[in-house]
Amino acid sequence: MRILILGAGATGGYFGGRLQEAGADVTFLVRSPRAAKLAANGLRIDSPLGSVTLTAKTVTAETLAQAGIWDLVILSCKAYDLDDSIRTIAPAVGPGTAILPILNGLAHYEALDAAFGREKVLGGLCHIFSTLGTEGEILHMNQLHRLTFGERDGGTSPRTEAFAAICATANFQAIHSTMLMQEAWEKYTLLATLAGMTCLMRANIGTIMATNDGDAIAREMLAECAATATASGHAPRPEPLSMAEGIVTDPKSAMTASMLRDLEGGGRTEGEHIIGDMVTRAKALGVATPQLRVARCHLQAYEIRHARG
């Protein structure tokens, strides 16, 4: 199976590197500066679960058309780069190509289906806390490195089984799910709460919990997200919901959403893709989301100021 991964950053680079480490045929589609850095320094993963430096195969948008068709294209871009990413990967997609997005949220599926056809687009999500270091190395910051994938309509297929066989020997937790969209909604419920709270308060979870009303507001926001998932036909199961509650109310946690790091760095955020989409879905389903609406307003105001310079 020829695998093309869009991006060699903290997420795509990590999972792609682990797949390559296990012997998979992996190529990274990157911009020219990243390709040059990878050629000079290799793809370096620093992780408590095993560090490695690999010689990465790369292509750029300018050379992709000459590189042939891939069996699997994994998308690990930010949501605000999705339209450009769709145009970029188009030359790599043939009749038998499967596309596996591991973006946050759910809004990207509509755009991918429209561009390539729903039958080509698998469901995917990941759980990992990682970032890029100053030299372009991938810093994996804890024990969590889980990639979940499957057919969006449930069950399995030869293409997902083939990818599962490749993942079986890789140094990460691979889950070949037969109920992918249920798991996607459960992650979305957690992520929207975590991003909404930490961006709105500009603080990590432990700091928020030290305030008078932080715990109550976090629980209210989580309940809004869970109610939206339930109204969408994917009520969170007790164990994932309990885990999410524990994460967003942990008084000892230094956790923040990556969206807060983007915001504090003065960059664009996935606010509309994550928080905005949850609010839009909730409104269409008649679910009240007062806390999420405040978080969305905060992020929209930031984006307006950012666009103005």
Image: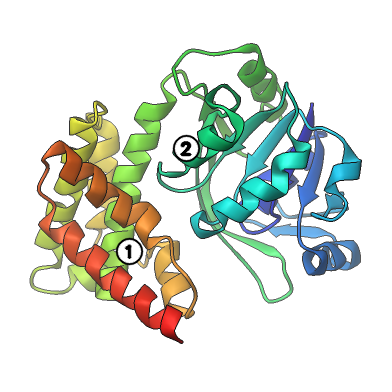
Q: Which residue sits at x=89%, y=62%?
A: 39
Q: How many numbered marks are there?
A: 2
124 to the left or right of 89: left
Residue 278 or residue 246, whichever sits in front: 278
Quarter of the image where one finds residue 35: bottom right
The mark lying in front, picked from 1 and 2, is 2
Residue 123 or residue 190, whichever sits in front: 123
Q: Position of residue 278 (x, y in %)?
A: 27, 48
Q: Earlier in the sequence, mark 1 or mark 2?
A: 2
205 to the left or right of 223: right
Q: Position of residue 118 (x, y in %)?
A: 53, 26
Amino acid type shown at disc 2: Tyr
68 to the left or right of 256: right
* Residue 236 visible in the picture: yes
Quarter of the image where one finds residue 15: top right
Residue 237 or residue 304, whichever sits in front: 304
Label 1: how many residues lie within 10 Å, few (<14), some (14-19) or many (20+)? some
Q: Position of residue 51 (x, y in %)?
A: 72, 55
Label 2: how many residues lie within 10 Å, few (<14), some (14-19) or many (20+)? some
- Report the disc number at residue 109: 2
- Report the disc number at residue 253: 1
14 to the left or right of 245: right
Q: Which residue sits at x=41%, y=44%?
A: 107
Q: Which residue sits at x=64%, y=56%?
A: 47
Amino acid type shown at disc 1: Ser
Q: Which residue sits at x=40%, y=70%?
A: 260
Q: Secondary structure at mark 2?
A: helix
- Report the disc number at residue 307: none
Q: Secondary structure at mark 1?
A: loop
- Residue 11, compared with residue 139, is above or below; it is above
